[in-house]
Amino acid sequence: MGSPIEEKGRTEDEQSHQVTISQDYYLGAMEVTQGQYEKVMGTNHSYFQGRRVKRESSNHPVENVSCPPVSPAHSDSHSLPTT
C-alpha cells in the first residue's frame, strides 16, 4: 500500500508498506448505483443527477463517493445491498 517515490503528486504520508488483509474482502461484480448508495448512506453526492441528466438517475453508477471515517466497532454496519 502507498505509492512509488517517483509518482507525480505523491506526498510524504504515502510511504509504501506491506498490508495483510486478515478478513474476507469482497468486490461487487457490478458498479454501485446512486439509488443503492443513497439507501445506505442517506445522501447522494453524485455530480450526474438532477438537472444534469435527462432522466431519473437512481440507476446511474455512483461516480463520486464521500465516506466518513468508520470506527472498527461499527465497520460491519456499513455495507451496500446485494441482489
Image (tube, grey):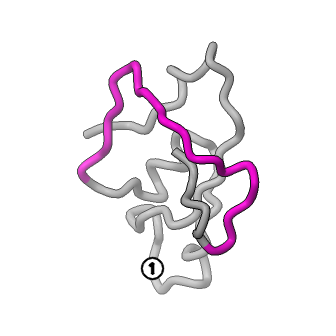
Residue pictured at 51% horizontal, 83% vertical: 53
Residue 61, quarter of picture: bottom left
The image quadrant where one finds the C terminus is top left
Q: Vertical placement of 45 versus 79: above or below?
A: below
Task: Find residue 68 and report its image quarter.
Answer: top right
Residue corresponding to mark 1 = 55
Q: Is residue 12 on the magenta stretch? A: yes
Part of the protein shown in magenta: 8-29
Q: Nearest the camera: 56 or 73?
A: 73
Residue 24 on image: x %, y %: 33, 24
Q: Secondary structure at mark 1?
A: loop
Q: Which residue is pictured at 61% across the width and 62% down the height?
A: 5
The answer to whether 41 appears left or right of 28 in the picture is right
Residue in the image at 38% along x and 63% along y: 59
Out of 52 and 69, give the one closest to the viewer: 69
Image position of 49 with respect to 54: above or below: above
Q: Is residue 25 above or below residue 75?
A: below
Query: Hey, which residue is sitting farthest front in the picture?
Result: 5
Q: Is residue 72 left or right of residue 23?
A: right
Mark 1 burial class by Cα count in 10 Å: few <14, some 14-19, many 20+? few
The residue furthest top is 73
Report the predominant secondary structure element of the magenta stretch.
loop
x, y percent for residue 7: 58, 69
Picture coordinates of residue 11, whole percent (x, y): 73, 60
Count of numbered labels shown in the rendering: 1
Q: Nearer the viewer, residue 36 or 51?
A: 36
Amino acid identity at mark 1: Arg
Task: Indicate yes or no whether the magenta region holds residue 25.
Answer: yes
Q: Nearer the viewer, residue 36 or 73?
A: 73
Residue farthest to the right, as pictured: 12
Residue 4 image offset from top left, x and y in percent? 55, 60
